[in-house]
Amino acid sequence: MAATRCARRRLSTARSSCAPAPISTPSPNSPHRPAQRKIPMNFRPRLLPSRTVPCWLALAAASCATAGEWSHIQGPAYDRKTSEGATGTWKTGEPRRIWEMKADGGFSSFVTGDGKAFTVVPIEGGGREAAVAIDRKTGKPLWQTALGVSEYANGGARGARGNDGGDGPRATPVFAAGRVFVFGAKFDLTALDAATGKVVWKRDLIADFGGKELHWANSASPLLVGDKVIVAGGGRNQTFLAFKAATGEVVWKSGTDRVTYSTPVFAKIHGQDHALFMVERGLVALDPATGKELWHYPFPYRTATCASPVVWNDIVNVTAGYGVGGGACKVTFAGGKWEAVELWRSPGNRDTAAHWSTAVVHDGFLYGCYGHGEYGGGAFKCIDIRTGEVKWQQPGFGHGQVILAGNRLLATTDAGVLKLIEPTPAGYRELVSADIIAGKVWASPALSDGHVLLRSTTGGVCVEL
């Protein structure tokens, strides 16, 4: 790549002068008393020069998240939206860089809380992964905690020329009320103290609840509703499990389903709380208080379903690659009975299929990166959630991601370009863009207090909007 001013700013590969913090790793005999030891990791934050200087009732509703925090991969309210606007100083050129970090591999995204940023990285030498915390404002490493074994079936190595490489970790942590919850590659759910990284409790869904490994390992993040952490991955009659967030005690377990790679979401539909999961038989809606199935929308499964459901009022959109395509159902409640009525279905990979990128909905229109296997070239599209009609499409995004910041779309391409886009069905209207990070970017951006945090297979970056 030519060394011009407009060329990509590559992440530094030099080691930071700040030594890695001790890693908290569980004792073999007691998961509640982690031993402290050093583990070498490719985790090297670098602060860039600037031109200018538990109360568990707090989780009663996802929408109660503190402004300025991006606590879940799907955002503080599980809808990829924040009221925090993208109307800062970034108008032209590149946004101001705050810090960069080096971390070799992985697709885990950043989440934020209590002034920190959290993500999951591979441990140097392979075979395990670790949760890490850094100071959100400076990039200073705070703690690193070794998690479970991470074996991946080469599921991230494909891509367009110059855009390949990478594998796990894939799941993103969740932050809530001073805790960080991590759902590992082999369905191990770990609660960490957000201040220290110490293990508070841990549950193994394969060993203790009859779960089975997925071919490409777990990619889903946990769901927090009220005082419960809800996940899928257990065995017969306990596919879906809710644990007390404070202690890890089982609250309820239900269902016999084969799980997928999709992260569940929380939504309120017709006044009822919903936990929405994509499983092999389609979309399943559970009452998060009890685990009871409310309704089911049949949707095909082939190889993998990765994108999360998207909810707009009483309409739920789902999508998958591998020739499945997209669809939407309208949820009704009458006479004490729930029902999901299909509105439209568009099979195949061309129109409404998304390999794993989750869209965001605004005023009834979906905005997101669509296509299957279109590394580097997949289109960013606007789709009417009510009809499935594609209003417009813009190529060159690949399997990127998007969130809604106030009244602006904040989108990333899978090659590391950050774009600010106006959300309108009238046509593609890009306001500004910049190439901000090297490597493959399948992770989702996080917006926190005017800063965008983004991971790639080479590390992470924090820029100011």
Image (cartoon, rainbow, N blue to C red):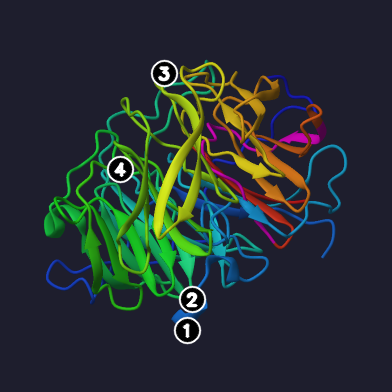
Q: Say above or below: 93 vs 117.
A: above
Q: Are marks 4 and 2 in contact (CB under 8 Å)?
A: no
Q: Check disc 4: other Cα within 10 Å, few if <14, some if 14-19, many if 20+.
A: few
Do the numbered discs 2 and 3 sit on residues whose CB atoms are within 8 Å? no
Secondary structure beneath dot 4 equals: loop
State which tag comes first along the sequence, 3 or 4. 4
Residue linked to disc 2: 177
Distance, label 2 to label 1, CA atoms, is 6 Å
Residue behind mark 4? 125
Task: Between label 1 and label 3, give the one nearer the viewer.
Answer: 3
Dividing the picture into quarters, in which one does residue 361 lie? top right
Q: What's the residue type where badge 2 is placed?
A: Ala
Seen at 76% across and 39% down, the residue is 423
Q: Earlier in the sequence, mark 2 or mark 1?
A: 1
**Horizontal side of residue 88 vs 242, given as left or right:** right
Q: Is 185 displayed left or right of 333 in the figure? A: left
Q: Identity of the amino acid at label 1?
A: Cys
Specify the amino acid type for callout 3: Gly
- In the rendered image, which residue does mark 3 sit on? 323
Asked whether 94 or 234 is in front, the reply is 234
Quarter that holds the N terminus: top right
Label 4 sits on what residue type?
Gly
Q: Earlier in the sequence, mark 1 or mark 4?
A: 1
Residue 435 inside the magenta-drawn segment = yes
Nearer to us of marks 1 and 4 is: 1
Q: Badge 3: how crowded within 10 Å, few (<14), some, or many (20+)?
A: many
For residue 221, say whether it is visible.
no
